Image (cartoon, coloured by chain):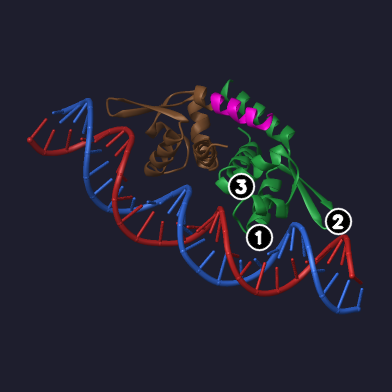
Chain colours: A brown, B green, C blue, D red
Amino acid sequence: MNRSKLENITKICKALSDPTRLKIFLLLTEKTLCVNAIVRSLEVSQPAVSQHLRILREAGLVYAEKRGYWMHYSANKENVEQFMGEFNNLLNK
Amino acid sequence: MNRSKLENITKICKALSDPTRLKIFLLLTEKTLCVNAIVRSLEVSQPAVSQHLRILREAGLVYAEKRGYWMHYSANKENVEQFMGEFNNLLNK
DNA sequence: TAATTATATCTACATTTACTTATAAAATAC
DNA sequence: GTATTTTATAAGTAAATGTAGATATAATTA
């Protein structure tokens, strides 16, 4: 089994292994939100949310798009589904 | 979204977020192994493997069955697939 | 019985992680 | 231009995590 493939799996799983970060991700599966909207939804500071978003972005789980001085985040569902498919294949071969 | 459901997801993701633990899990998807067989496959101590197996077991990712003084471990694929299905539903509703 | 084998648990420690406060950077508004 | 707003980054810190060595537990063998 490929090393970088292993790293990709652990990176994605690690990103979803923190409850706050998972909540952020699930919020973003429902709609696009800017950072402050997420801060208001959860009880976490703005820097904490920004750091979680960076980790989600590096794992390929969310998109980020700058508009004005807002940063719009949304879930990268296609990527997640592809990952799930590949992981499922691992199990059944 | 249910609190215990969230905890279940984070527990499973956390279990798969460590490279050594992921390797152990993937080994167990291929065949049933006792602890020492896993120790020999990877370059980790026996206590480390035992602790990883405990975490995988608590996440519902592996079965454990005692035979003689061996403990036979194998992947709980059904559980993983069910989890993947539920998670996928979360994305698409 | 005692010795051996396999696994689990305990303890200690170095590393990683999630967080807060403070600050910087980038865009907008005045 | 300066002030304001939004987000990102830096620094410090307490808590969690992964590990190895030592030890305990449970089953087997002699």
Q: Mark 2 = which residue?
A: B68
Disc 2: host chain: B
Q: Secondary structure at mark 1?
A: helix
Of mark 2 and mark 1, the one earlier in the sequence is 1
Provide the residue designation for mark 3.
Answer: B21
Q: Point out residue B20 in the picture as x, y percentages from the top left corner.
A: 58, 48
The one of B27 and C25 positioned closer to us in this rendering? B27
Q: Amino acid at mark 2?
A: Gly
Identify the residue at image location x=60%, y=56%.
B44
Measuring 42% from the left and 33% from the top, which residue is drawn there? A57
User: How would you rate the neighbour count of disc 2 (Cα within 10 Å): few for under 14, some for 14-19, many for 20 or more?
Assistant: few
Q: Chain of mark 3?
A: B
Task: Find numbered disc 2 in the image and state the secondary structure of the residue it sits on.
Answer: loop
Name the mark on residue B18: none
Give the CA separation, mark 3 to mark 1: 13 Å
Please tell me if label 3 and label 2 are on a single chain.
yes
Relative height, residue B25 to residue A83 (above, below): below
Image quarter hosting the C terminus of chain A: top right
